[in-house]
Amino acid sequence: MLGLLGERSLKILVTGGAGFIGSHLVEALLQGGHSVTVLDSLVSGTEQNLYQCRKSTAFKFIKGDCRRPSDAKRAIADQELVYHLAANPEVRLQLSSPRESFENNIQATYVLLESVRQSSVQTVAFASSSTVYGEPHTIPTPEDYGPMKPISVYGASKLACEALISSYCHSFSRRGVILRLANVIGPRATHGVIIDFIRKLRNDPARLEILGDGRQAKSYLYIDDCLDAMIQAVDSSRDVVNTFNIGSEDQATVTEIAQTVNEEMGLHNVRLQFTGGVDGGRGWIGDVRTMLLDVTRIKSLGWKPHYSSLEAVHRTARELIRADTPM
């Protein structure tokens, strides 16, 4: 049976649609025959990411801020589905602040939900994060794992947003789809370990500083696989609140990623310099050492990743290097 996105053309709002994941999602939704409106403040996203989208008559861009009720209300008018991706994307506390996570994640989600409550929107799909689990004792980690104890302010803010969405959906007869994403990588990415390594190696091709002990092991998901899962999850959800882990089925260590980037840049005999990190080898305070999501639930809908973590890293590093991504 066809789901929500397969039945007919929908009017869809994508907040944060000028960002890395958002712009790719907008392209996929337009290709699927839907009308898409983007609400983005262009603080971290760029209009260049939406260059191809602007060629479509089914695309509309609104420069605005989810934290501002008037902007959210204007963008959400006449929409049927919202993909809420607008957020402060930085996990590392030294590069952000608790206030930024609160305002850009929690407050923005509250303002958006208030607009949803007063609109015709029936479904809100939220880009959450694997960081909501903190340091789980069960690996791979299923959606019903608990108690969840985030170890970063970013993870806590995402968990708070999940709770807000759940409460609004139950209170005001809406449907929520929570998408707990692993590390999503690919072209247009603007931050993360791969970009950090490329930038450092461009500055010094003989030495690469690695935060932590290099043994941090996490799941990395290529953007195309992520988009397929995000669309499939919304298409197949039937409960009031539906939660899905979205990630690859294996891990890559930071050292393996460093070696992959070296290889893709054609560098040999690069000296890897490990900082040792904090709190038992973490790259920074709040860095989760091991992350691997149980993706059995999303796979039961017919989805599966096409790329392993290292295959995704190879592909992403090659694309970013070839595009000469500014660092």
Image (cartoon, rainbow, N blue to C red):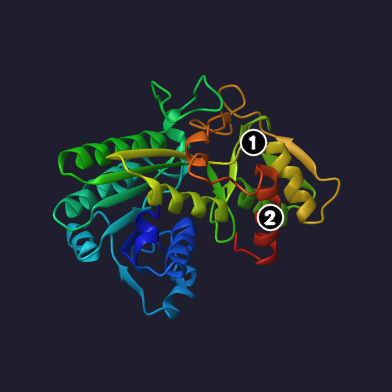
Q: Is residue 16 visible?
A: no
Direction front: furthest residue: 1
Rounded to the nearest angstrom, the CA distance separating label 1 from label 2 is: 16 Å
**Looking at the image, residue 188 lies above or below residue 251:** below
Residue at the spot x=72%, y=43% of the render?
Answer: 258
Direction left: furthest residue: 118
- Marker disc for residue 188: none
Residue at the spot x=44%, y=29% of the render?
Answer: 133
Tell me where residue 106 appears, x and y as whole percent.
Answer: 28, 43
Q: In this orientation, which residue lies closer to the viewer: 118 or 151?
A: 118
Which residue is under mark 2?
315
- Marker disc for residue 250: 1
Quadrant hosting residue 319: bottom right
Helix, strand or loop under label 1 = loop
Tell me where residue 191 appears, x and y as whole percent.
Answer: 54, 51
Helix, strand or loop under label 2 = helix
Tell me where residue 194 appears, x and y as whole percent.
Answer: 64, 49
Residue at the spot x=60%, y=63% of the render?
Answer: 326
Lower position in the chain sequence, tag 1 or tag 2: 1
Q: Is residue 279 visible?
A: yes
**Looking at the image, residue 71 lies above or below residue 128:** below
Residue at the spot x=38%, y=38% of the render?
Answer: 243
Q: In this orientation, which residue lies closer to the viewer: 16 or 31?
A: 31
- In screen coordinates, is 191 left or right of 9? right
Q: Tell me which amino acid carries mark 1.
A: Asp
Label 1 neighbour load within 10 Å: few <14, some 14-19, many 20+:
some
Tell me where residue 208 appears, x and y as whole percent.
Answer: 73, 44
Q: Nearer the viewer, mark 1 or mark 2?
A: 1
